[in-house]
Image: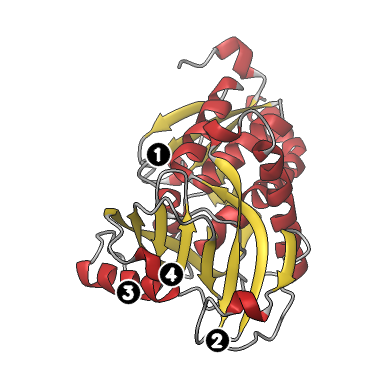
Amino acid sequence: MSHDPIMSAQKIQVAVIGGGLVGLSTALCIIECLPQCSVTVISEEFSPNTTGDVAAGCLIPHVYPDTPLHQQKAWFKETFNYLFKIANSSEASEAGIYLISGWQIFKSAPKEVYPFWSETVLGFRIMDETELAKFQSYKFGQAFTTLKCQASQYLPWMEKRFKSKGGYVEKRKVIDVWDLHGTYDVVVNCSGLGSRDLFGDQSIYPVQGQVLEVNAPWIKHFIRDGDGSTYIYPGISYVTLGGTRKKDDWSCLPNAQTSKVILERCCHLEPSLYGAPVIQEKAGLRPTRSALRIVKDVLVKNGQQLPVIHNYGHGGGGFSIHWGTANEATKLLQQLIPFIHHFKLVSKL
C-alpha cells in the first residue's frame, strides 16, 4: 500500500516498531484515537510468528512487582471491558474472543484471597469443598469467568482492522532507530526484547515458556495452579497445556523432555487428559522486566531530535493488560503532538 503524499503530508508520521500483540494494539489505538496521525507498523515478524502466538491468551493478570498496583488494575479493567464488548459483538468469532470459566487452585490459601482483579472478572467466588474435591492436594481455590483471546485469530483481526482504518504495515527489521528519523516524526517502541539492542535496555530479559496443544474437546473449563506453573486452557480448536518459566533462556525450540513433564503435571490436575493426542509443541520468549516501561523519551544525536514513546516489558501478562497499556501510550503521544507540530514547523524554517 503506497502513501498518498498530499494526504499524509499534513499528518504526523508515526512508526510503531513491533508487530506483535503490544505493537498492533498500540497502533490500532493510535489510529482510532488520533486521526491526525498516519501510522505504520514496522516489524520483522507478524502473526503467526510472534510471542503472542505461543500464549494461551487467557485474561488472568500477572503482578509486576515495580509497577503500581492501581495502575495494573486500571489497565486490566480497560482491557477486559474492551474485549468484553468484542466478545458480545458479531466480530467475536472472527476476532477469536470468548468467555471462559474455570478454577485457579492453590496448595495453601494465598495471602490475597481476593486478588486486585477479582472485581473485574465475572462471578468471582471462593470454591467450596465439593468443587475442591476434584483437585486432591489442593486446599484452596477461586472460581470465575474471564475472557480468552485465540491469538491466531485475534492478531490478524487487529491487523485487518488497523489497515481498514488507513494504517500501513511494513515487514522489515529495524537495525538502528535513527534510520527512521526524517521519514517519521515519532517512534513508538513496542519491540519487547528488541529494546535491548535498539535502545540499550539491559533490564529486559527473556523468560522462556513452552506449551503443548492437545486435542481434548471434552475439556470445557480452564484449570490453573495459582503458582502459574501448570495450566490447562481450552481453546477453539485445541487445549493449551503449560508451562515453563525459564529465565534468560533464549531458545524458541520446544524440548521433548519438558513436554513430557508438562503433560504429566497437567494430567495430575485433569486425569482425562491421559492419551490426548498432541497437535503441536511451541516455545516463546516473554519480554520481562520488573516494571513495564511506558514513557516518553527524546533521543538526541548530532543536534537532531527523535521523540520516542516506549511501551514494552509485558512479560507473560500481555493479553491481560494490552489495551490498557495501548491507551496509555496513545495518551503520551497525544501530549507530544504540540511539540511535534512545533518541531516540524521549526525544521521547515
Asked whether residue 307 is in view, the answer is: no
Distance of label 2 from label 3 (alpha carbons):
18 Å
Q: Amino acid at mark 2?
A: Lys
Q: Callout 2 environment at 10 Å: few (<14), some (14 to 19), or many (20+)?
A: some
Residue carrying label 1: 46
Please report whichever mark, 2 or 1, sits nearer to the chain's N-terminal start: 1
Q: Position of residue 301 (x, y in %)?
A: 51, 49
Distance of label 3 from label 1 (alpha carbons):
32 Å
Please report whichever mark, 4 or 2, sits nearer to the chain's N-terminal start: 2
Please report whichever mark, 2 or 3, sits nearer to the chain's N-terminal start: 2
Distance of label 1 from label 4 (alpha carbons):
34 Å
The label shown at residue 270 is: 4
Residue carrying label 3: 264
Quarter occupied by the N terminus: top left
Please report whichever mark, 1 or 4, sits nearer to the chain's N-terminal start: 1
Looking at the rendered structure, the secondary structure element under dot 3 is helix
Camera-nearest residue between 29 and 229: 229
Q: Position of residue 219 (x, y in %)?
A: 46, 57
Distance of label 4 from label 2 (alpha carbons):
16 Å
Distance of label 2 from label 1 (alpha carbons):
39 Å
The label shown at residue 107 is: 2
Q: Callout 3 environment at 10 Å: few (<14), some (14 to 19), or many (20+)?
A: some
Camera-nearest residue between 129 and 85: 129
Between label 3 and label 1, give the one nearer the viewer.
Answer: 3
Q: Position of residue 97 (x, y in %)?
A: 58, 42
Please report whichever mark, 3 or 4, sits nearer to the chain's N-terminal start: 3
Distance of label 3 from label 4 (alpha carbons):
10 Å
Between label 4 and label 2, give the one nearer the viewer.
Answer: 4
Question: Position of 40 compared to 286: left or right?
Answer: right
Residue at image coords 55%, 86%: 107
